[in-house]
Amino acid sequence: MYNVEVGEVVRLFHAIQWLSDMQMDNIDFEVDSKIRKEESEFGHIIAASCSIFHSKFSNSQVEFIRRQANAVAHTLIGEATLLASPSIYYAIASCIESLIINEIL
């Protein structure tokens, strides 16, 4: 278990690494905490994330988004904690379907 700040940094690092390994590009990453490497004791993880990001992604960005506007991500995280093993969804997960429809409207 990580605190929120560390969890956000570690999740971003693993997402960047995973998508880099899959040779994907044009990805926008959204985070809901404003962590700067010079302000964090986990600056080395942030620095490694930045290094991979800048070397592997040409048309991508990492954006801060308000936590209140990130309901889909928080719902998925809550769902993931209930799963016994990792899952990949090839369609919209039922737990977020209504949230996405409401955002579209």
Image (tube, rainbow, N blue to C red):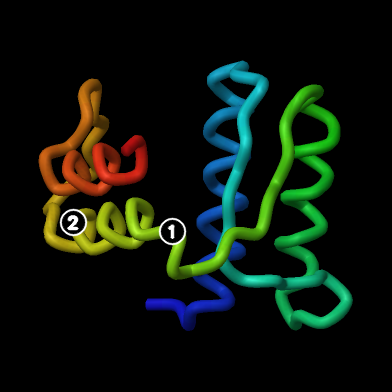
Residue, far right: 38
- Percent x, y of residue 66: 55, 66
Q: Residues within 10 Å of mark 2 (few under 14, many from 20)?
A: few
Which of the 4 image quadrants contains residue 17?
top right
Residue, far front: 105
Image height of 29 relative to 92, above or below: below
Image height of 36 relative to 70, above or below: below
| Left or right of 18, for residue 36 | right
Which of the 4 image quadrants contains residue 39?
bottom right
Three-letter amino acid code at the position of disc 2? Glu
* Point 60% across, 43% down: residue: 29
Taking depth in this image into account, of 10 and 98 the one nearest to the observer is 98
Q: Residue 55, which numbered label?
A: none
Q: Quadrant of the N terminus?
A: bottom left
Number of marks present in the image shown: 2
User: Which residue is tagged 2?
Assistant: 79
- Percent x, y of residue 3: 48, 82
* Point 43% across, 58% down: residue: 70
Image height of 2 relative to 49, above or below: below
Cα distance between the residues tagged 1 and 2: 15 Å
Q: Secondary structure at mark 2?
A: helix
Work out whether mark 1 precedes mark 2 in sequence or the reverse, and give the earlier one: 1
Image height of 16 relative to 4, above or below: above
Residue, far top: 23
User: Which residue is tagged 1?
Assistant: 70
- Percent x, y of residue 32: 56, 65
Taking depth in this image into account, of 84 and 80 the one nearest to the observer is 80
| Left or right of 63, for residue 2 | left
Q: Secondary structure at mark 1?
A: loop
Q: Residues within 10 Å of mark 1 (few under 14, many from 20)?
A: few
* Point 30% across, 59% down: residue: 77
